[in-house]
Structure formats: C-alpha cells, structure tokens
C-alpha cells in the first residue's frame, strides 16, 4: 500500500520541505522496534523516526544524507532488509521496487523506463 497523502504532508511539514517528495517508504529497525520513514527528494535522503507504535507520525530526524547516497541493495530471504548509514532496516516486500527506483534514478538512469507523457 502506498504511503498516504496525510503521512506525506506530515513529513513535508516536519522537514519544512518546499521541494517535491520523489519517493517515500516506511521501514523498521531490523529485529523490530522503532519505525522509520525514508523521504527522498531531489537533494537529499532523510530518515525520520516515527517511534515504536506506528509509522504515520514523524517524531524526529534520524539522519539526513545527500541524494547521491545509495539506499539499497535490498537483501531478500526471510524478509527484505537493507543496510543504510551503518544500521539495518526491514521493509515490506512491496516497497523494494521503490528503493530500487530511487537508487536507479541516481546510479543507473538508463534502466528506468521512459516517461510516456514527457510534455506534462
């Protein structure tokens, strides 16, 4: 399920963002515990902690990184996990393509499909 518009708006307000959010996905600390939202804009990757009770309410910025920071690769098996900034995170399988697209946009642009409506 995509991240809802209200959650996106909370992130935007929380971070004071005027730019578009390119990608956003929820994750949890590997092994359980705190929830996080990864917010990717044109300029940065910001990881927001949402606490242990839910993934819909930003509480604090865990870290902010230049957009050139790779998020994946995602390791799959018993669950989808990835290492980012020295910590391990778990993500629902449905968000693996989001992570792959965010990385491909920076590191492998030729692998992305062409925009079918470039004039919009």
Image (cartoon, rainbow, N blue to C red):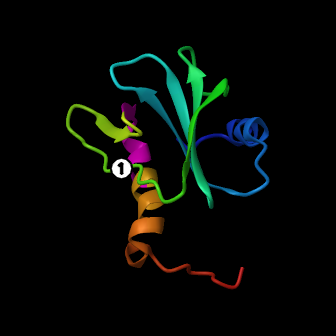
Q: Residue at x 20, y 37 (%)?
A: 77
Where's residue 54, x and y in %? 57, 20
Q: Is residue 79 above or below residue 20?
A: above
Give the quadrant of residue 38.
top right
Q: Secondary structure at mark 1?
A: loop
Q: Residue at x 40, y 36 (%)?
A: 91
> Of residues 94 and 110, which is closer to you in this image?
110
> Of residues 85 and 108, which is closer to you in this image?
85
Tell me which segment is drawn in magenta: 87-97
Q: Is residue 42 above or below residue 59?
A: below
Q: Residues within 10 Å of mark 1 (few under 14, many from 20)?
A: some
Residue under numbered circle 1 = 72
> Of residues 55 and 84, which is closer to you in this image?
84
Q: Residue at x 63, y 83 (%)?
A: 118
Q: Horizontal placement of 81 versus 40: left or right?
A: left
Give the quadrant of residue 113.
bottom left
Q: Given the current orientation, which residue lies at the most extreme bottom position?
A: 119
Where's residue 70, x and y in %? 41, 54
Give the quadrant of residue 66.
bottom right
Quarter of the image with the C terminus is bottom right
Q: Horizontal placement of 18 versus 109: left or right?
A: right
Q: Residue at x 75, y 35 (%)?
A: 14
Q: Horizontal placement of 32 versus 38: left or right?
A: left
Where's residue 15, x and y in %? 73, 40
Where's residue 37, x and y in %? 56, 36
Q: Is residue 81 above or below residue 44?
A: above
Q: Is residue 100 above or below residue 5?
A: below
Give the number of callouts: 1
């Amino acid at each position: 399920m995509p991240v809802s518009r209200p959650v996106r708006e909370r992130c935007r307000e929380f971070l004071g963002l005027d730019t578009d959010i390119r990608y956003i996905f929820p994750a949890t600390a590997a092994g359980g515990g705190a929830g996080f939202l990864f917010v990717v804009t044109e300029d940065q990757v910001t990881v927001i902690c949402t606490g242990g009770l839910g993934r819909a309410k930003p509480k604090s910025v865990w870290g902010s990184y230049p957009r050139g920071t790779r998020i994946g690769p995602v390791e799959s098996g018993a669950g989808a996990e990835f290492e980012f900034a020295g910590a391990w995170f778990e993500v629902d399988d449905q968000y693996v393509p989001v992570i792959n697209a965010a990385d491909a946009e920076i590191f492998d642009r030729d692998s992305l499909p062409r925009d079918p409506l470039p004039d919009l």
